[in-house]
Amino acid sequence: MMGLADFLIIESVLGNTGKTNKKRFFRPLAPGCGQLFSYLLLISALALSACTHINHNITISGTSDYRHYPEGGGLFVSTAFGPDGRLWRIVPEKKHVYVDYSTDLGKTFSAPVAINTESQRIKVSGENRPGIAVDRSGRITIIYAAESDQPVTVYFSVSADNGRSFSTPSPLSDKASEANSFQGRLALNPSGQAYVFWHDERNRTDWKQPGNSIYYTTIGNLEPPVFVAQKLSDTLCDCCRIAAAFDTDAQPVLLARFIYPGGIRDHGLIKIQANSKEPRSWQVTFDQWGIEACPEHGPAIAISDDGRYHIAWFTQGSARQGLFYAYSSDRGQHFSKPLPFGAPEKLPGHPDIMVQGKRVILTWTEFDGVKTQLLIRQSNDGGQTWMQAKSIAESTAGVDFPFLLSNNHGTFVSWNSKKEGYRLIPLN
């Protein structure tokens, strides 16, 4: 007889993942995964990743007050700097998504602007989070997930008037009425072209077999916008978000968790090639994590000006367990020996990575049973050697994942928590 820890509700980030008739289903975990499931469940709980729900009764006592939001704001926010130094933020609530901005590095924010004037059931979690990007002209692009004809659909909206108004949200997928699309990843290339990558279920035929497809499109300035959704790969791990960066040729490089033969959930790179219709893809981590469950733990990637790839990821494989970092000097063909970071006894998780010339920065969270700590670790020689890890903030309540940002004022960690509110933490 199986216990609670032997099952995983695949509802996850979708609310009803995996079947277009919106029915919930269960997938049994592999033998011996009960302890792992408890670990993952705790990580998810710490991040308040209740997946289909956000906290709607947040009391803020920190640097960013959400009391001017109709339902108290949401935990899973995303931010981006604009060309004028403003910090733009997208904040999801239960039925609406809002955008506001700060001119004082996150200490105070403007009145929020509603993106969707018509009520929607917003779908949000740490992995299925909203996205925001601002190009050099000040054009703002946002994405978020909400229920539509299917349990979950990625929507987009743009503002061409410096955030005073936004276009009516529209689905990104050309098959949005037929198949789920979720966990969108929004990124700007060096010239400001907006790319969106997402999980797509249009190609699934056997629901007993896990794995989604990756699709992507670009968002231009045409009115109305014209999208061409293009498939990149199959066998994408159902619940882990996609990481994206741009190579020195300005082409996208994705790092994602895939399902390899034997049920192994390791990571692979996908490189979109400018003069080819077919992307290149290959496996880059070999942790041998054999599990029939959803880790809900996406990786991170950054690419330096000299073309060195830097990656960070989480695993519980038979070869290694915990958080790891590696770099590649030949554009991902070979990587350095994985470097562990974080204290294993404190459940390290959800890393982000940034590179600035030879400077490489990692950030992640750890939990000691009482509080969650936000940590950073830095290298000044392209990842060859590293300084000691440093704790820069903490919280005794639920927290979001940390993300690295930079502009002319410096480098920061963007971090939201239920008790302390939003914090933009400068790094010296």
Image: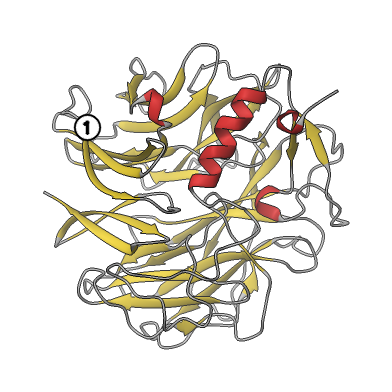
As drawn, which residue projects farthest toward the top?
319
In the image, 275: left or right of 14? left
In the image, 333: left or right of 177? left
Image: 278 above or below 48: above
Residue 297 visible in the displayed image = no
Q: Which residue is mark 1?
A: 389
In the image, what residue occupies the spot 52% across and 83% down?
70
Q: Residue flagged by tag 1: what amino acid is it?
A: Ala
> How packed is label 1: few (under 14 Cα within 10 Å), some, or many (20 or more)?
some
SS class, disc 1: loop
Q: Which quadrant holds residue 362?
A: top left
Residue 292, position as x, y percentages in the image: 71, 27
Q: Which quadrant holds residue 380?
A: top left
Residue 216 visible in the displayed image = yes
Q: Nearer the viewer, residue 162 or 124?
A: 124
In the image, what residue occupies the spot 35% across and 68% down?
135
In the image, what residue occupies the spot 37% across and 28% down?
331
Image: 110 above or below 38: below
